[in-house]
């Protein structure tokens, strides 16, 4: 048996990704593949339109030159017709091209968004443990990835294609400019270098700002959702903390605004300087063209072409640089998406998992040490415990003793830091977590309520039974909820939510229903019961919110349900655990005592002390000695 296992990263140690910087080429390839997979025809059409539209301004400038030169040199009508028709064609492309491109871009964005979201949530679901979702850095990145995943691939393709289009335009005008004035062509190009550097620096700054704003907005969302959450409304009103929460929302918004404002200010400053530089260059070019026309070195059409070429090179060079910077920004943002999608699983998953057979012998926790992070205290310190097949084990212990942590280790949401959890001798690290969980039925202490129908709230326990109403009703009956659910306005189809309507036409909407805390607990229990016949049943505080009668009924039901089944029951109510085959008392991260109820009472240890304390609470203080608790205040006030 392996007592010291390889170390597994705790939640806070888990990096937010694969830890390497992807090359720009890899990122571009990933984005192109995403677009081509999601919307191949629309992507190809959009790419073609965007690239060909890059040549149109050059076409228009040349047609204008030919027309003007033809007119000033008395060319015949047929010679003039060709540039005129070329001009009309270019004008049509200018008019229709952007409309078609916008439509195709919409198609690409929607399809890519869908595929990107699908891949993102598949990737999140691929983590077998809870570590990633308890890591704020990962959650920050996930938030950005959700936002950018929908649009960034399209943006990236857009920026890259637009850059390609601008490059074509720049090249076209550059050829013209070199023919007219090579020195001027060089000056215009050289002026683009500082502009390129400035734009790239700006885009890196913008990309960093997006992550920072996302981090702030995640907190803002938390406060904003709290203000509107029905579950929080009672405390917010009672403690009068609405204004406090509102001030937190506003503070986060101000912080986010400050970040975006600083980005805007930097952008305005940089682009103003670049504009001035560009004006100086084109001003110098104009002076040269006027002199050249004056001395007869340039025709009137040549001056027009020169002005258009300088303007065209500058304009398209400017937009080329902006698009390059936008591509770089989109690549940096896309990296967050790829980081989430390509992140390694938060727990090591065996390449060839050892199959888990139906439980024969039992589950053993062997010298298990566990802490949530290296700088946290140990929760379990060399714990040894055996859950025998077919037997019921109860776990008791004070708050924070580590009972729920032990449940999470059994479900393999985390791996022990040292030691091992063994299923009939198979280390859970060597098994497939999905197979492990399919063999269990668990009611967590912090069970989930779903804003769905009553039937769905139970059927989610086993999706194969979602439509099997008799199985759902049987599970509800075992949890003592059948009558209540059957009497709801739409029976089991009633929405258990006041936040959402049933997925039906608006005129058929009827208000949903809310259940009481104890009824929710029974519903969660029904969800566990519908997973009948699993190898291990874990119930973590199944009756904490129940009234005395319900608790009694539920415990009878649980007893019946877990008879001859392997079960682990956690409860602070010691009356509920007394009939378990064995009871283990957890303390200081270890099993302090273990035995049957009778054995533990006889040994006079921690269990006996806790049991006596609880039993004392039920002693009638008006009958007999040894009473505990305060005197009846009503009687005291009446002077009795
Ligand atoms: N996700 C987590 N990250 C960090 N620490 C945690 C996490 N969950 C629990 N802990 C810590 O682990 C310790 C054990 O918690 P656990 O929930 O296992 O106790 P418990 O015995 O179930 O307590 P209770 O009786 O109150 O339900 C506590 O000190 C708690 O603060």
Image: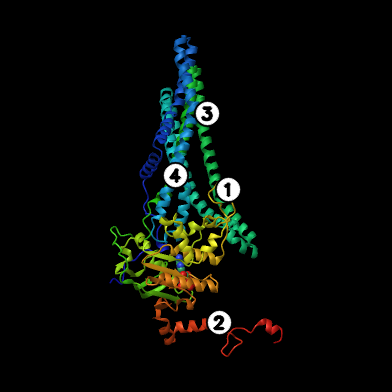
Which mark identifies residue 283?
3
Tell me whether the residue at label 4 lies in contact with that at label 3, contact meaning CB atoms closer than 8 angstroms. Answer: no
The answer to whether the residue labelled 4 contacts the one labelled 1, judged by CB atoms less than 8 Å apart, is: no
Residue 187 at x, y = what percent? 44, 31
Q: Position of residue 121 (x, y in %)?
A: 43, 51
Separation of residues labelled 4 and 1 (CA atoms)? 29 Å
Cα gap from disc 3 to disc 1, whole angstroms: 69 Å
Residue 625: give x, y in percent of width and height: 57, 90
Task: Say which label, 2 or 1, has the lower sequence index.
Answer: 1
- Contact between labelled residues 1 and 3, with CB atoms less than 8 Å apart: no
Above or below, 372 against 330 in this view is below
Distance of label 4 from label 2 (alpha carbons) = 59 Å
**Which residue, given by chain and number where applicable, does mark 1 sit on?**
508
In this picture, residue 232 sits left or right of residue 439: right
Q: Does dot 3 land on a helix, a strand or a loop?
A: helix
**Residue tagged 2:** 618
Whether label 3 touches label 2, CB < 8 Å: no
Earlier-in-chain disc, 3 versus 2: 3
């Amino acid at each position: 048996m392996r007592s010291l296992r390889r170390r597994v990263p705790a939640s806070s140690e888990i990096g937010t990704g694969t830890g390497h910087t992807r090359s720009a080429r890899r990122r571009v390839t990933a984005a192109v593949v995403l677009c081509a997979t999601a919307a191949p025809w629309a992507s190809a059409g959009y790419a073609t339109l965007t690239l060909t539209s890059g040549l149109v301004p050059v076409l228009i400038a040349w047609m204008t030159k030919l027309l003007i030169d033809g007119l000033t040199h008395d060319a015949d009508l047929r010679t003039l017709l060709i540039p005129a028709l070329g001009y009309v064609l270019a004008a049509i492309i200018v008019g229709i091209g952007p409309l078609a491109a916008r439509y195709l871009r919409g198609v690409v964005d929607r399809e890519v968004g869908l595929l990107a979201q699908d891949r993102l949530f598949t990737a999140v679901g691929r983590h077998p443990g809870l570590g990633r979702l308890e890591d704020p850095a990962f959650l920050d990145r996930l938030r950005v990835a959700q936002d950018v995943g929908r649009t960034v691939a399209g943006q990236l393709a857009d920026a890259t294609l637009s850059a390609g289009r601008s490059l074509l335009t720049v090249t076209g005008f550059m050829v013209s400019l070199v023919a007219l004035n090579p020195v001027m062509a060089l000056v215009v190009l050289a002026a683009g270098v500082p502009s390129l550097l400035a734009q790239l620096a700006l885009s890196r700054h913008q990309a960093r700002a997006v992550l920072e704003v996302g981090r702030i907005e995640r907190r803002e969302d938390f406060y904003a959702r709290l203000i509107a959450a029905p579950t929080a409304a009672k405390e917010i009103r009672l403690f009068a903390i609405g204004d406090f929460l509102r001030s937190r929302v506003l503070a986060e918004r101000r912080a986010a605004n400050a970040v975006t404002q600083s980005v805007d200010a930097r952008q305005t400053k940089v682009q103003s300087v670049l504009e001035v530089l560009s004006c100086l260059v084109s001003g110098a070019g104009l002076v040269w063209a006027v002199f050249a026309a004056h001395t007869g070195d340039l025709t009137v059409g040549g001056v027009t072409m020169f002005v258009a070429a300088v303007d065209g090179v500058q304009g398209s060079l400017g937009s080329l640089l902006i698009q390059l910077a936008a591509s770089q920004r989109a690549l940096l943002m896309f990296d967050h998406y790829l980081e989430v999608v390509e992140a390694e699983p938060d727990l090591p998953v065996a390449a060839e998992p050892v199959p888990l057979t139906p439980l024969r012998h039992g589950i053993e926790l062997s010298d298990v040490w566990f802490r949530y992070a290296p700088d946290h205290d140990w929760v379990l310190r060399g714990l040894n415990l055996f859950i025998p097949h077919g037997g019921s084990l109860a776990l008791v212990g004070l708050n924070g003793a580590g009972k729920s942590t032990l449940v999470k280790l059994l479900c393999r949401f985390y791996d022990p830091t040292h030691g091992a959890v063994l299923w009939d001798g198979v280390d859970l690290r060597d098994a497939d977590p999905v197979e492990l969980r399919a063999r269990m039925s668990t009611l967590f202490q912090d069970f989930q309520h779903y804003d769905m129908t009553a039937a769905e709230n139970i059927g989610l326990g086993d999706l194969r039974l979602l439509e099997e109403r008799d199985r759902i009703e049987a599970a509800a009956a075992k949890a003592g909820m059948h009558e209540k659910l059957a009497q709801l306005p739409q029976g089991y189809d009633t929405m258990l939510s006041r936040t959402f309507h049933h997925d039906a036409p608006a005129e058929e909407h009827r208000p949903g229903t809310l259940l009481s805390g104890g009824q929710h607990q029974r519903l969660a229990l029904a969800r566990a019961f519908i997973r009948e016949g699993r190898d291990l049943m874990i119930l973590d505080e199944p009756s904490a919110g129940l009234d005395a009668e319900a608790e009694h009924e539920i415990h009878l039901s649980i007893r019946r349900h877990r008879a001859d089944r392997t079960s682990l029951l956690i409860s602070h109510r010691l009356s509920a655990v007394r009939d378990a085959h064995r009871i283990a008392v957890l303390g200081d991260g270890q099993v302090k005592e273990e035995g049957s109820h009778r054995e533990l009472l006889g040994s006079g240890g921690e269990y006996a002390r806790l049991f006596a304390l609880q039993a004392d609470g039920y002693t009638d203080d008006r009958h007999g000695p040894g009473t505990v608790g305060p005197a009846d205040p009503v009687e005291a006030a009446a002077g009795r």
